[in-house]
Amino acid sequence: MTDIPSPAPPTVSVVVATRDRPVLLAKAVESIMGQDYGGDIECVIVYDRVPPDASMERSDPHRSVVVVGNDRSPGLAGARNSGALRSRGALLAFCDDDDEWLPGKLSAQVALLESRRADVAVSGIYVLFDGRSTARVADESSLTVLELARRRVMEAHPSTVLVRREAFFDRIGLVDERIPGGYGEDYDWMLRAAAAGPIAAVQEPLVRVLWGAQSFFQRDWRMVVDGLEYLAGKHEILRADPRASAKLTGRQAFALAALGERRQARRLAWRTFRSNWRQPRSYLVLLMTAGLLRPDFLLRTAHSRGRGI
């Protein structure tokens, strides 16, 4: 009897959007090329608003690197879509240019996708900030639409996402390029992914996420306010659920307080309190508008614990 050969593992295309961070980019690509995954890996580097550097291209059919420019809207969302559209793999993954994958990431996630028949898989992360490393792992029960709406679930980081190609282009959709400043584009995509079907999660941290490096876009608090307003208009759950609504208005209030718009910030803080008195952002904002706390101190404190505001 002739043995039937096992099918080859699916090709994985990894999109890395970048701009002016060559040292970090090189480390990210090295971690992708160094995966212990038995299938082919294609890394698509997308240069956003800067000329592409073709020096990193690699023609190895099993571990290739392709360099392209962002030919869609400027910013992270357009760059990610440009890379996805240029890719050829049956599976798509994303990695920020300041993050690094641990060697077993793809092997664990591809195996989980196959065993669960899921469209999307994530993994845990190590948050690296100010010399500290904090492990964060998402439980699958937190990756539903309702729980994602109520809590950002930073553990489900975009650099951990692995998705079937047909799901990305058909059932979930591309990254939304209309969000003001691209703020929360990954969160919007994750909400849509959860609505399309269950998200599987490898229960160990397999990505190192560097916080505190130069951001892909500089923090713009007005952009945060506008981006959250856009998301609230797009996803009814963010308005309908009291806890989700409180989280969103609390974040808007924080951004307004950071802008110095104290009256508006206090108004939203009180609205947050009425929606959910347990939401801590309402209290933080009132302390900020009283001049007792500074936004940079609160951000640094949250980041040191592997969390965000």
Image: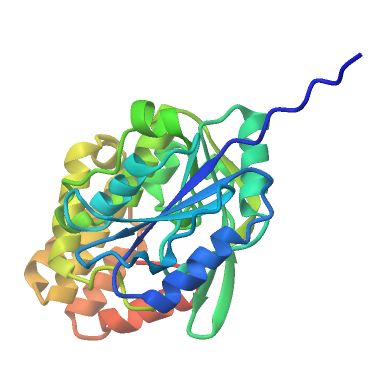
Q: Which residue does the image show at 39% across and 68% down from the upper left?
A: 55
Task: Give the image quarter of residue 81.
Answer: top left
Q: Position of residue 87 (x, y in %)?
A: 40, 42
Identify the residue at horizontal 42%, vertical 29% (top origin): 167
The C terminus lies in quadrant: bottom left
**Residue furthest right in the image:** 1
Number of marks in the rendered image: 0
In the picture, measured across the screen, residue 110 lies left or right of residue 163, that is right
Q: Residue at x 23, y 40 (%)?
A: 239
Q: Is residue 275 visible?
A: no
Q: Percent position (x, y) of residue 180?
A: 15, 54
* Outermost residue, top side: 1
Q: Nearer the viewer, residue 104 or 3?
A: 3
Q: Which of the two residues, 192 or 25, is positioned nearer the viewer here?
A: 25
Estimate the x, y position of residue 166 in percent, counting from the top left: 42, 28
Residue ID at (44%, 75%): 24
